[in-house]
Amino acid sequence: MSLVLYEKEFKEINECLNNLLLGAKAKSIFLVDKSGQLITNIGDTVSFDSIALASLTAGNFAATSALAQLMGQNEFSLLFHQGEKENIHISVVESRIILVVIFDDRTSLGLIRLRVKTAISVLSEIFKRLFVKVKKEKELIKSMSKKEESHPKPEMQTPSKPLEALSEKQDSTKDNSQGTQTEPEIQESNNKTSEQSDRFGEDFQQKAANKIDNLFMD
């Protein structure tokens, strides 16, 4: 899990480490997460591969923690590696952060321990405040997610037809109803047509008979 840092706390951490660097006359200082993530570093960092050092420091501390558990202890809060020219002092801050101080013969182990103890006190307060802030933000995000789940967005509904379209439809229905004849009206129309045809036939026959009479009379 990655460590979340805010600008305010990050500046306070760097200020604390800078005071430690100057007060202890150290060569360089690294702050590392137990997962191997490099948080920050100050001093002479050109001589070291910072990423590799952070990863190896975390692995080293994990190994010594396992050794401490074999001996019936939770962990070793402090580690010291002495070299020919340079030494490494490793300590834990708030059970998650590893403070690595690299120093040479320009200073003493006693001064390093004294200054580191003071720095750990300051760093502990900063990280406590930071962890509380991160926890509150996570709870807030979780709460907001639950609210969104309990109040889903309403589904989109198909918009109703405009009033003009409905009016046109009603007018069209009305026109169709007026243009359509009922069955009695159709029957009456047919009867009128039949009567007109009969009268036309009678008139035609009468006119034809009159013409024939006129021919014989001539």
Image (cartoon, rainbow, N blue to C red):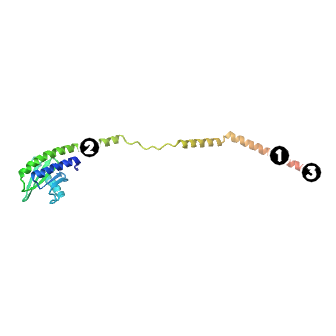
Q: What amino acid is at disc 2?
A: Glu
Question: Is disc 3 placed on a helix, strand or loop?
Answer: helix
Tag nearer the camera, 2 or 1: 2
Which of the two labelled residues, at mark 3 and mark 2, occupies the earlier sequence position?
A: 2
Give how far across and how far down residue 100 sits, in percent. 13, 53
Tag nearer the camera, 3 or 2: 2
Which of the two labelled residues, at mark 3 and mark 1, occupies the earlier sequence position?
A: 1
Which residue sits at x=15%, y=45%?
A: 124
Q: Which image quarter: residue 103?
A: bottom left
CA distance for labels 2 and 1: 106 Å
Which residue sits at x=57%, y=43%?
A: 168
Q: Which residue is identified by label 2?
A: 137
Give how far across and how far down residue 59 sits, in percent. 15, 54
Residue 213 left/right relative to 195: right
Along the viewing direction, whichever of 176 and 122 lies nearer the viewer: 122
Residue 216, numbered label: 3
Q: What amino acid is at disc 1?
A: Asp
**Residue 133 seen in the current view:** yes
Q: Which residue is identified by label 1?
A: 203
CA distance for labels 3 and 1: 21 Å
